[in-house]
Image: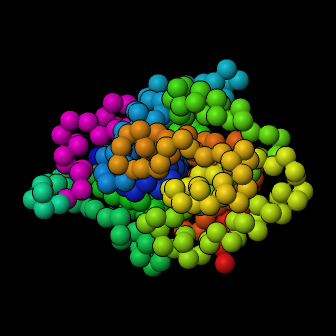
Amino acid sequence: MKTNTIILEGGLGNRMRVAAAAYTMAQRLAAHGNPIPFRVLWTKQWGMKCWFEDLFEDLSEREGKESSSGNAVLPPTGGAGRGAFLRDATGFERFLFSRPTLKNLYLPRLLQCLCYRHIILSPQIYYLQRDGFDFETWFQQGGTLMTAYRDFCEWDDSLIPLLFRPLPAIEQEVSTRAAAFTPHTIGLHIRRTDNQASIDASPDELFFDTVDRELAQHPDLHIYLATDDEPTKALFRQRYGTDRIQTAPTQATRDSASGIREALIEMLLLARTNHVYGSAGSTFSEMAVKFTGTPLTILKK
């Protein structure tokens, strides 16, 4: 049977939820007696200048294997290619599945149309969902190609820590920074810069009100602030003090591997707080709490 291929697009949170949806769909087809392999490929694009292997452990080392407790760590999916369900694009795949642009003369899209008879592109998914499209039947044909930055079926939160296990060096850095947390540490994710929906729906005043309430109950309150906006960091330090506010040591950026690595560290730090307060219109804090089950409140007007 021909492999179904899904190309991950968008930022870190979007890629996580698409991969979880793809894994769920692969398991669903297998349960219905139609075990078509799925190949979920991680590519470098604008906003994601980093490879999967720079952030997470190789899934091919864990698929179908058991943990020390005897429970399956990650059931096999029949992944194609190097044996992994989710992996970096390699060799010619990096060109074939790159984003078509004038720079590459849109050749990737032409080649994709020659290689796949059935293609769904990222912008189409929202409208297909709205109209009740049956994605499972579509995938049953095999040999499909989808580019996606949004999920297309329901999936279980427990898949996130199974599919995305950070590299040991990243986990160590998270533990080092989390050592500054107090018993009453909250996480704030304040999305700004290019996300107008978050700016409009989740203004600073909502976060101020929340922190003030938390502070009234817990004088030893510690705040981990994850934001892509340096002026926001300065504003919160001025209001609550530099000793109480903890932030990333560098400015947030998505155009380098180090910037994406820092974003993952921030996501995992949010997951270690007692409660996360997030911005509307962003999947970042939503994905963060799925690693640990930390309570999440989206602050929205």
- Residue 199 against residue 156 in the figure, above or below: below
Taking depth in this image into account, of 226 and 34 the one nearest to the observer is 226
Determine if the magenta segment contains residue 81: yes
Along the horizontal axis of the image, is 207 left or right of 124?
right
Instruction: Please name the residue shown 52% across and 26% down the image.
Output: 169
The rendered magenta stretch, by its main secondary structure, is classed as loop
Q: Position of residue 228 (x, y in %)?
A: 50, 56
Determine if the magenta segment contains residue 127: no
Q: Position of residue 252 (x, y in %)?
A: 47, 50
Q: Position of residue 51 (x, y in %)?
A: 36, 39
Range of magenta residues: 77-100
Q: Quadrant of the C terminus?
A: bottom right
Taking depth in this image into account, of 88 and 214 the one nearest to the observer is 214
Instruction: Please name the residue shown 62% across and 61% down the image.
Output: 235
Q: Position of residue 280 (x, y in %)?
A: 59, 68
Instruction: Please name the residue shown 51% across and 73% down the image.
Output: 197
